[in-house]
Amino acid sequence: MKRFTLLTAAVLFLGIASVASAQTATGTLTVTATVNSSINLVFNNDAAGVALSSGAGTNTATLNFGAVSAFGAVAAGITRTTTATTFTVSTPVDVLVTKANSASANYTLKAQLGAADAVNTWQVAGTTVTNAAQATITATGTYAANVPEAIALTIPFTTANATAISNTINFTATAN
Amino acid sequence: MRGRFVLAIACVILCAGAARRRPALRLPASPVADGVMSFSIVAVPDGARLTDLGGSSAGIDLGTVSRVSGARSNVEVQPKATGFEVKTRFGIIIRDPAARGRTGSLLAAITVPTRYTIKLDGVQLGPAARLVASALRPGTVTTHRLEIQVPADAREDEAALLNAIQLTVVPE
């Protein structure tokens, strides 16, 4: 008799537990998005060059050669060459281009001066850059690698002492 | 004698239960149906726009996103070393017609296996439901953070993101 009562009680408890667990509410949040490919360019310090004054690791950096001269001492990281009428100071700056969600194999890097300079000559990786048009620096740049690009400035001997020289070089990387 | 008495009572209980359940099938607004906790997915001020899909379901379109930009308002894109993360928010409001003062727990799971990492309130979702939030009070909109990590090597042609998050609210 006792055994029968216990069995009945157990069945009732199971029934209650079943009702309680069934009281859940469900819904669905459908999530959609379209992922586009993109590339990113940053300037980094090159171990063999002059450290960037500001903006290392970003896409807006400042490079300061400091005081330069044709025949005086040359600061660390700067390479100087001279001709009969001019001298050139050069230092490498790393350009890092990364890609995301892209099947692109490489990139094209172009550069252009921000403002005209009729006196001095500006070069990136041996290619003269002006403000007139973009100059192609490389057509097969390697992604995700710090590529040293030599920034060179050629100054005539006729430039007066303590002349400040400043300009902007705009770089554009395009996925191929 | 006592054995027969207990059997008779059990029979009365079962018969009475069946008699009470029958009207509930015909009337949706029965006391039993009213007592069930339910919830809705709602937009929040700093969250992406939602599409009501009826019941407790909604759609959320994060628009076109890339490592460097997001097109939709209240859809945040954060570049990461291994790709980028898309973030937004949405709300959930629980209703408990029984008004028993109980709270609810929110569980979530994704319905489609994906290369993307999908997190809700910091909890990485998988095919099995996981507890995301607890002590949700009925009648109060709670804001939940949706994060999707897109790997950089997911190609554009395979990067159309479509998934569904199964949400379950359980009374506590």
Image (cartoon, grey):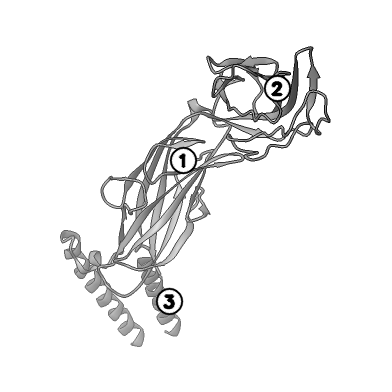
- The picture places residue A164, in percent across and down from the top left corner, at 65, 30
Q: Mark 2 highlights which residue?
A: A152
Say what amino acid the circle numbered 3 marks.
Leu
Q: Are circles 1 and 2 on residues that touch, CB within 8 Å? A: no
Q: Split into 4 quadrants, where in the image is the N terminus of chain A?
A: bottom left
Between marks 2 and 3, how big is the CA–CA gap?
A: 93 Å
Mark nearer the N terminus (2 vs 3) = 3
Bin the neighbour count of mark 1 within 10 Å (Cα to Cα): few under 14, some 14-19, many 20 and up.
few
Q: Mark 1 highlights which residue?
A: B112
* Residue at left offset 36%, top offset 62%: A22
Q: At numbered mark 3, what does the secondary structure look like: helix, strand or loop?
A: helix
Can residue A145 be seen in the rendering of this structure?
A: no
- The picture places residue B144, in percent across and down from the top left corner, at 41, 56
Bin the neighbour count of mark 3 within 10 Å (Cα to Cα): few under 14, some 14-19, many 20 and up.
few
Tag nearer the camera, 2 or 3: 2
Rendered image quadrant of residue B140: bottom left
Q: Mark 3 highlights which residue?
A: A7
